[in-house]
Amino acid sequence: MDDPEATSSRGEATREALLQAAIAQFSELGYHAASSRKLAAAAGVNQALIGYHFGGKRGLYVAVFEHIGAAMSGSLGPAAAAVQTLMDDGEATRQELLDGLLVIVDRAVGMFTSPRMASWAKLIVREQQNPSEAFDVVWQRFMSPIVGVLCRLLATLRRDSPESPQIRLMALTILGQALVFRIARETTRRLLGWDEIEVEEIAAIKLCIHQNIRAMLAEEHAS
Amino acid sequence: MDDPEATSSRGEATREALLQAAIAQFSELGYHAASSRKLAAAAGVNQALIGYHFGGKRGLYVAVFEHIGAAMSGSLGPAAAAVQTLMDDGEATRQELLDGLLVIVDRAVGMFTSPRMASWAKLIVREQQNPSEAFDVVWQRFMSPIVGVLCRLLATLRRDSPESPQIRLMALTILGQALVFRIARETTRRLLGWDEIEVEEIAAIKLCIHQNIRAMLAEEHAS
DNA sequence: TTGACTTAATCAATCGTTTAAATAATGATT
DNA sequence: AATCATTATTTAAACGATTGATTAAGTCAA
């Protein structure tokens, strides 16, 4: 985003400028209120270039979700892949699997609380309410694989099927425990008297969710 | 909407028709995509009546949130008051307090997931991405009692202070477990195959969160 | 008859997209 | 190296469609 040599051709530079401007504009104004003229002006680029490079405003919107889907996948993908191979081996101890789960949760908390996630979350949450083709992109590229690993992991730890509603509900409630600190960020700051949510605060959040998950998965409570 | 005598004058009838149509249209399409013509057509009235009765499209939008805010306020009051007196007695057993907590959580889950809340939630979640000052006040007024009673109950059950960060974090994670089903509505739909969240689905959600909370508050895990 | 309400028509503004011409980079040929 | 053809990219201007709002005339109940 800063290295002028990283984007070789002219076209690549304007594509990147439009993409970054689109993330900011779409997240701040929503799809319809972010007009082609505002998008082009924010990118410092001629309006017709949206059609030239992305086929139109809609194409730029979808490209935004391809971008953030790839970025989020890169943030959680490695940890999920590690756990995946751990499970495929079939010889992992319960403790190893639990640790793998907590690592994924840690990464998720870190991602949700990161500053750049603020605008991403607005875009995705809007799509969650009224999903379009853009949601499919994020779902297939990021959400579906991650949730899949999460369910497999929980199913193994609870000796249940990854497809069972109980497991999937549990996966969502775990997701919710991390998500709430992004969605209700202001409520969190007010309630805890935090001026900002950084390393120290994130550590406290992780610790709390760790304890919750350990309790939820304690053997004596597996119904 | 059903009783023709409830709304006396002609004007009151069109105001109500526009309000109900606006809730549906704004939640389904968003503010900008729900055009004045669509709103009027959905209400079965002339377009100019939006301006006549509400001053304009923006005024109708504000009226929708005033309507929702009024309907939501005080919906959790009775249950919260009952638990409050239970705690004030000081002689409640641990089991009674736990039951009280689960009742509160049930009410909160029921409120978040109730079918009529479905369209409200879309409006609220969308608006919360870029909250106006007026909306923020309504939202805080709605959330703070829930968080407050939740913290007091958790503090008693964990023999801790309601002001302690651990208790408040735990309250937020519990809130997140209920919120996730509305915030990540499409993820829920795809993962569980739920097209609608109604009595059966709400019962499953409550059961899952109950189990989680019981595990989180099990004595042997209280650190 | 008076005032509340409704209607159809029209307003300027803005929307996303398209066009044709201008400019810039690229590679081959001389 | 210099020139040219070719492609890639950018530009300003315009397109028809739709937006929210307004108007003046009309209808209704009291």
Image (spheres, coloured by chain):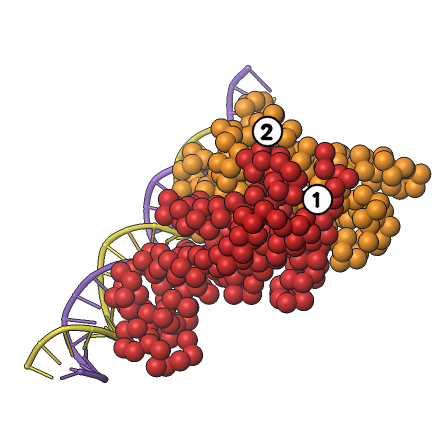
Chain colours: A orange, B red, C yellow, D purple
- Residue A97 on image: x %, y %: 83, 38
Closest to the observer, C4 or D17: C4
Marks 2 and 1 in Cβ contact (< 8 Å): no
- Residue A201 on image: x %, y %: 59, 29
Three-letter code, disc 1 = Leu
Which residue is rendered at x = 27% and y = 66% of the image? Answer: B53
Q: Residues within 10 Å of mark 2 (few under 14, many from 20)?
A: some
Which residue is rendered at x = 36% and y = 63% of the image? Answer: B36
- Looking at the image, residue B159 lies above or below residue B90: above
Closest to the observer, B87 or B154: B87
Closest to the observer, A172 or A125: A172
- Residue A11 on image: x %, y %: 54, 34
Three-letter code, disc 2 = Glu
Q: Which mark is residue B217?
A: 1
Label 2 and label 1 in one chain: no
Tell me the SS state at disc 2: helix
- Residue B137 on image: x %, y %: 40, 46
The residue to which callout 2 is attached is A201
Left or right for B74, reference B193 = left
Let me know if residue A161 appears in the view.
yes
Q: Quadrant of the N terminus of chain B?
A: bottom left
Let me know if residue A116 appears in the view.
no
Q: Residues within 10 Å of mark 1 (few under 14, many from 20)?
A: some
The alpha-carbon separation of the residues under discs 2 and 1 comes to: 23 Å
2 or 1: mark nearer the eye? 1
- Looking at the image, residue B193 lies above or below residue C3: above
